[in-house]
Image (spheres, rainbow, N blue to C red):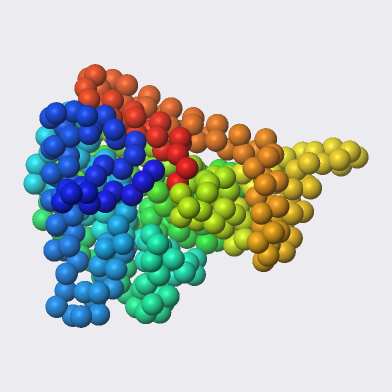
Amino acid sequence: MTETSRLNGSLRLPAGFELIARDDRLGPLVVESLAQIETRLEEALRSTDHLADVTARHLLQAGGKRVRPLLTLLAADAAGQINQKVIEAAAVVEMTHLATLYHDDVMDSAPLRRGVETAQTVWGNSVAILTGDLIFARASAMVSELGQEPLLIQARTFERLVIGQLQETTGPAEGQDPVAHYLNVLAGKTGSLIAASGQYGSLLGGAPRDVIDMLVEYGEKVGLAFQLADDIIDLTGHDDVSGKTPGTDLREGVDTLPVLLLRRDAECEDRSVADPAREVLDLIDGDLSSDDALARAVAAVTAHPVSAEAWDTANRWADDAIAAIRPLPETVTKAALIEFAHAVVHREG
């Protein structure tokens, strides 16, 4: 999935939304709305304090897919209309996402984000954390002007984001299924904000309550599919496409779905015979500091059936997302939402 970027003075849609670009009504409407959102983001993150101004716009200026604002627009158009409140809400969800990235990069000690040095690499952890807090504050101020229900959506989404991060940090409780725990983390850290995109857009666009519920469910499930695919791409993607060196999570000791499935299989294998899962785990749990060792571990995981099983899981979540919006009228907007759900699990980066 490519980045949303400027092309001949306008915004280019990310991969997975080709139907929108081909539609004479929806294409111009969405592209113009995205341009308004981009302008609103620049305005909202501007500050009279020089350091705050530079740090808050650091990741914004590095680009991004703008998937969450785009889904907000589509949710509004699905059974309502794109209006100024929807534009404002779309900027809110992107700012909230940006804020989480500042915090994530501190917790992960990540050196790069979107091809540029992360904020904590340039200015240190304290400045990065405070910048994320500043962006959250600006987003909250904006959403407070949209009404009580949007403000409640923001508060509950923020809570889920924090709990998801806490759960990832602490790991599964004793006796808890690690795969179930992992999916709960993804639901909190990724699914919650994409679900909020669907809820903001449909609510503020004037959709009836049953449609709002459909788009919330769609967002939650497509968010799970999106993040599952991201984690699998960490193993199978090419660094020139995905922007990550394959195996980054392995090297950092982060157990994503393929590794969790390997550990499950290793526990179930007959120890009297050769155990392929345990052999792969020996590579994963060994010293991965050298590029050669990491490449061998990546190749071993990719070749094991758990990789295909992980992709099957991502595809099931995408299929479930599509099922959630099946009752919607057959429009270009609905077709675009279906196209996106397919696209998130059929990409290289």
Q: Nearer the viewer, residue 79 or 68?
A: 68
Residue 114 location (% of width, % of height): 38, 59
Q: Which residue is located at x 84 percent, y 37 percent?
A: 270
Residue 120 falls in image quadrant:
bottom left
Residue 80: x and y in percent read: 13, 31
> Between residues 246 and 201, which one lies in front from this camera angle?
246
Please say if 216 is above or below 99.
above
For residue 225, say whether it is visible: no
Q: Identify the residue at horizontal 45%, vertical 46% (top origin).
A: 349
Residue 183 placement (x, y as % from top left) = 51, 44
Q: Tell which residue pokes out farthest to the right in this image.
A: 272
Instruction: Tell me the quarter of the picture where residue 128 sits.
Output: bottom left
User: Seen from this angle, which residue lies furthest left?
Assistant: 84
170 to 235, vertically: above or below:
below
Measuring from the top left, give residue 319's x and y in whole percent: 43, 27
Task: Identify the residue shown where x is 8% and y is 46%.
Answer: 84
Query: Is residue 128 placed above or below 80 in the rendered structure?
Result: below
Location of residue 251 (image quadrant): bottom right
Q: Residue furthest front?
A: 8
The quarter of the rendered structure image containing the N terminus is: top left
Drawn side of residue 80 relative to residue 336, left or right: left
What residue lies at 73% left-to-right and 51% top-to-bottom?
281
Q: Nearer the viewer, residue 230 or 269?
A: 230
Whether residue 286 is visible: yes
Total marks in image: 0
